[in-house]
Image (spheres, coloured by chain):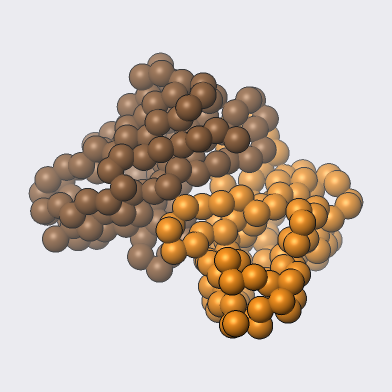
Chain colours: A brown, B orange
């Protein structure tokens, strides 16, 4: 499976600021995804990062709050904008390969705390 | 919409014993994928095992096996010879078998404690 890294691994931010999280994969992948895991909760898909086009957002998530870039097949960024304490979560990227990829592999996650 | 339910928020087992984690799901589709992921305190999500719904044979990976009951929409995980390193949150997940439908739907998780 692909090796996935995320930066930063953790951060503490002030409300009203923005943070950009990077996801880097060691091989080209078809699909990249961003998930949020709120404290003590399960994972929820934020959006699918599409290479060369806008990301596809899930219900409840909007581009103005979570802009996503996917400049190539190995890299994506997620920005958490105008943060509030409710944005404190673990943010994870995952990747899949091929049109019928049946398995997603996850990065190590970014733990965000907003004060 | 598909839903995944894990009815056991916490489980514990003695080291070297066997434990079974429960998962049920709701879907109207006949073909799909099911997964178990493990999340240790490091927060890395690690794939444990996967099952294709169109396969009748239960998946097995070393000490991990599943009991897949399609009619009952049940997908339990059995861990044999439990080890201290198995302590983690375990998440059951569902994925549709349709091109482009990559979304994983997760259950709420079961926290597994291994007692030495």
* Residue A27 appears in the picture as rendered: yes
Considering only vertical position in the picture, is A29 above or below A45?
A: above
Q: Is A110 left, or right, of B11 in this rendering? A: left
**Residue drawn at point x = 56 percent, y = 77 percent:** B113
State the residue lying farthest toward the front.
B116
Examine the rendered structure and indicate whether residue A41 appears above or below residue B57: below
Q: Quadrant of residue B67?
A: bottom right
Could you say where residue A80 lies in the image, as x and y percent from the top left?
24, 43
Where residue B107 appears, as percent x and y from the top left, is 56, 62
Q: How many labels sit on residues?
A: 0
Q: Position of residue B29 (x, y in %)?
A: 73, 47
Check the picture and name the quadrant holding the C terminus of chain B: bottom right
What residue appears at the point 75 percent right and 49 percent down from the top-left corner? B51
**Identity of the residue drawn at 15% across and 52% down:** A13
Give residue A84's position: percent from left, percent from top.
Answer: 17, 55
- Write the residue at 86% across / 46% down: B55
Residue A57 visible in the picture: no
Q: Is residue A12 left or right of residue A104?
A: left
């Amino acid at each position: 499976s692909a090796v996935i890294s995320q930066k930063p691994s953790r951060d503490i931010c002030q409300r009203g600021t923005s943070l950009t999280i990077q996801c880097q994969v060691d091989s080209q992948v078809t699909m990249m995804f961003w998930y949020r895991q709120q404290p003590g909760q399960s994972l929820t898909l934020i959006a699918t990062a599409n290479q060369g086009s806008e990301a596809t957002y899930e219900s409840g998530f909007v581009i103005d709050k979570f802009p996503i870039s996917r400049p190539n097949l190995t890299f994506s960024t997620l920005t958490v904008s105008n943060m509030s304490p409710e944005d404190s979560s673990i943010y994870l990227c995952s990747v899949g390969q091929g049109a019928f990829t049946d398995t997603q592999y996850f990065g190590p996650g970014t733990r965000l705390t907003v004060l | 919409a598909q839903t995944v339910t894990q009815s056991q928020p916490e489980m514990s087992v003695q080291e070297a014993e066997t434990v079974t984690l429960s998962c049920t799901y709701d879907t109207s589709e006949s073909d799909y994928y099911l997964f178990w992921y493990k999340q240790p305190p490091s927060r890395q999500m690690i794939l444990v095992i996967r099952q294709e719904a169109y396969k009748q044979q239960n998946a097995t990976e070393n000490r991990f096996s599943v009991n897949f009951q399609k009619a009952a929409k049940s997908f339990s995980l059995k861990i044999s010879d439990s080890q201290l390193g198995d302590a983690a949150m375990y998440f059951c997940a569902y994925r549709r078998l349709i091109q482009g439908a990559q979304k994983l739907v997760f259950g709420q998780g079961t926290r597994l404690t291994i007692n030495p």
